[in-house]
Image (tube, grey):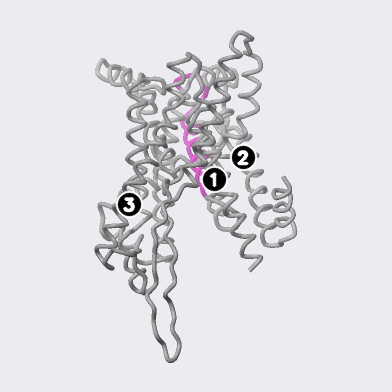
Amino acid sequence: MSVFLNKLKLIWTDTTLRKRVLFVLLALVVFRLLSAIPIPSIDALALSRFLSNNQFFGILNIFSGGGLTNLSIIMLGVGPYITSSIIMQLLTIMVPALKKIYHEEGEMGRKKFTQYSRLLTVPLAAIQGFALLAILETQNILVNLITFDRITNLIIVIAGSILLMWIGELVTEFGIGNGVSLIIFAGIVASLPSQVSQLVFTFDVSQIPLYLGFAVATVLVIAGIVLVTEAERPIPVTYAKQVRGMKMYGGGSTYLPLRVNQAGVIPIIFALSILLFPQMIGSFLSRFDGPIIDKISSILISFTQTSVLYAVLYFILVFLFTYFYTAVTFDPEALSTNLQKNGAFIPGIRPGESTSLYISKVLSRITLLGAVFLGFVAVLPIIMQYATGITTLALGGTSVLIVVSVVLDLMKKVDAQISMREY
């Protein structure tokens, strides 16, 4: 407790750190205010009934930061921006020119890559916004609309999504931590009071052992997330001795820390973004008539968060995205080249290609553990629902993983700022 209080004191006394923390808090306040401004022509009662019985929109609400609860102007949240990031990351593998921009042009290349993601966000927000508004209109949640009202609502939600993307990037640049992750984190935390009150109202004394089991499972999952997130595989590195003039330099030993979970919470967010599309498309198609369209729509809508197929695909996507994101963000060949340029080598491994292959082999092995763990945490709520019959998706493994990962990342960023201040 004393360590925590000392850190708070250091944060408040350090001018730069205090400004960054206050900027994050201000941005989150603005975000929550925006999430309370609804779009026009809403039937609040119909909306409340619809959201209470729809798990798909409950998951979508996480990405909107709680903006779907009252159909706010930021109802799309950061979903379109996340989707555009996924597409751009996939294109780096298929398009050599984009891979060169991302990996070889340094900071300027990454800025250009980010700009492409921003531009792609606009049409994606338009598509998702149109589909979502059409679904809500078929459910009689948006009423008495004319063409002008529909166009106005679409422009509002597109602008809201772009505004939220901008706020997230400002937080990343001028605050602490990743802005997009913090927005999703804020949405999850903001939903906790309503979730807790719902548990209180539905409390059943006979279910106390089950509640205790959920509490123990939650603690174990959080401990596992912290353990895997912080776990590292150290690779020993030795620097060759160099003689310059009359002095000898180098000769020291250190290690290269490879994290078990290099991708963090990104694979979960990517997988959820993709799995939301089938139900959204199915709900959109349900407004049209025709036997073939009705059949396709019913199949897509049946692809719910509680189905076995959903759980299997969720696990596979999280597993694959963990490897994919690690491959995109971590380049063993570039690391091997840098070690060789600095006169460093891994004992027992030849510099150059052999070092690159060795690092790739080690990284592939430890990523396997991280990918399996992330996939297990993602589908854990579905497994628990099948075992107990109680829906835990709202406070499930995905939400816990995002919250814990964001908190750990924030702590690391704060510690790094404090260390810089001491130096």
- Whole-Å distance between the Cαs marked 3 and 2? 46 Å
User: Where does label 3 land, which residue?
Assistant: 362
Q: Amino acid at mark 2?
A: Leu
- Camera-side residue of 44 and 57: 57
Q: Residue at x 64, y 9 (%)?
A: 205
Q: Secondary structure at mark 1?
A: helix
User: What number of labels is visible?
Assistant: 3
Counting from the top left corner in percent of width and height, residue 88 is at 35, 50
Q: Secondary structure at mark 2?
A: helix
- Whole-Å distance between the Cαs marked 3 and 1? 39 Å
Mark seen at residue 207? none
Q: Which residues are magenta?
A: 138-165
Counting from the top left corner in percent of width and height, residue 72 is at 57, 34
Is residue 144 in the magenta section? yes
In the image, taking residue 200 as reference, residue 388 lies left or right, namely left
Residue positioned most to the top = 206
Q: Amino acid at mark 1?
A: Leu
| Badge 1: residue crowd in 10 Å (few <14, some 14–19, many ≥20) | many
User: Where does label 1 land, which residue?
Assistant: 164
Q: Looking at the image, is mark 3 or mark 2 nearer the viewer?
A: 3
